[in-house]
Amino acid sequence: MPSKQFGGKLTDQWLGRYQSSPNWKDGAFKNLVDTQAAVNWRQLPGIICKQIKGHKQGYPASPLPVKPFDHAQFSQGSDTAKFVWYGHSVVLMRLHGKNILIDPMLGPDASPIAPTKTRRFSANSLDIIDDLPEIDLLLITHDHYDHLDLASIGKLKSKVKQYFVALGVKRHLISWGVEEQIIEEFDWWDSRNFEEINITFTPTRHFSGRGLSSMAKCLWGGWAFKTPRENIWFSGDGGYANHFIEIGQRLGPFDLAFMECGQYSVDWPQIHMFPEESVKAAIDARVKVAMPVHWAGFNLSYHHAWYEPAADFVESAQGHKLTCITPRIGEIFDVNSHTEHWWLKHS
């Protein structure tokens, strides 16, 4: 019997839905531009050796601390949105009076089906869920293991009222016991209103899959949130391309953007952004304040030290006069928060 980790079975019924998408071609979802999503098989032995060896500073010297959740501070009225980042790509937002959670992978292992573990930099991370408030809306960008986690979804179920997810994710959630009627799927540029928040699924240059048979059978993207007061963007995973300009033209400018920055490598340059590219993408999309995410959670690349994505992002942002923030894990912050090089204490 297949592991529950693989998610929902790809039936003809699901395939029929996906085939109606303009982004489905030749039996899979496709990027807007030609993209090498998988490594060349000739490179594979060398890449495996590099991955086993790893980076000498691939992990922090000790587990990264997570600041305890402060319910009173988070729920207190404010003129601006509030946020909490839990490492990697997990973001909790208090936006327009609603609690919104993005890509809540809070499990201890980002490779649960692999023979070796990819352990999280912070200990006991699933316990974070116990202290979280009720979640009005949970969003998923795509189905990779470092963004969609079986254990986290199971533990969150009783707290979540509604799910907005990338096209293709619904089958996984249903197979894990989430009620179908509270899940809505999005294709690129789909927009819906949620409690006076306009939410749009934006394109990225990436891929998806939880096993060989499900490669690119789920769409990938980011999320834009517009309220009467603020405009927020979560870029989602993906390499650099011209779609960032279109996102900025159609939905920008953004008061704050969570920019993918981490797990990049010269061996897969088109599916994750290097810090300089992440900064350029933010500028393309007309971002006023940027925050690097997709780091400080897992070691998924042998190319860089665990802290390097943030350090290089800050340096590049300063060079381009782009305002950026780097809050601590678990800290409640807003668009006016300061930048602190907190990772230096854990290197």
Image (tube, rainbow, N blue to C red):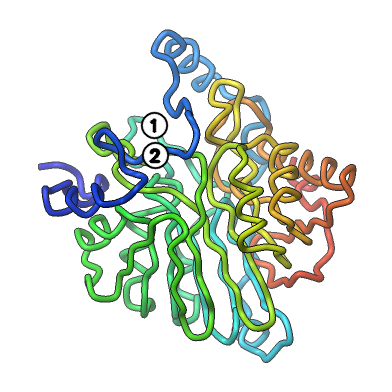
Is mark 2 in CB contact (under 8 Å) with mark 1? yes
Tell me the amino acid under the disc marked 1: Thr
Tell me the amino acid under the disc marked 2: Ser
Q: Is residue 263 above or below residue 89?
A: above
User: 160 or 248: nearer the eye?
Assistant: 248
Closer to the N terminus: mark 2 or mark 1? 2
User: For this view, does 227 lie left or right of residue 200?
Assistant: right
Residue at 51% from the left image edge and 40% from the top image edge: 205
Q: Does residue 149 appear in the picture of this structure?
A: yes
Q: Is residue 14 above or below residue 131?
A: above
User: For this view, does 34 lie left or right of residue 246?
Assistant: left
**Which residue is identified by label 1?**
116
Residue 289 coordinates in the image, percent (x, y): 77, 61
Disc sitting over residue 229 in the figure: none
User: In the figure, residue 320 lies in which quadrant?
Assistant: top right
User: For this view, does 124 lie left or right of residue 27?
Assistant: right
Residue 32 coordinates in the image, percent (x, y): 47, 39
Q: Residue furthest top?
A: 42
Residue 9 coordinates in the image, percent (x, y): 16, 48
Residue at 43% from the left image edge and 63% from the top image edge: 190
**Which residue is identified by label 2?**
111
**Label 1 Cα crowd, 10 Å radius (few <14 / some 14-19 / many 20+):** few
Quadrant occupied by the C terminus = top right
Residue at 44% from the left image edge and 80% from the top image edge: 136
Residue 123 coordinates in the image, percent (x, y): 53, 54
Residue at 61% from the left image edge and 37% from the top image edge: 241
Q: Secondary structure at mark 2?
A: loop
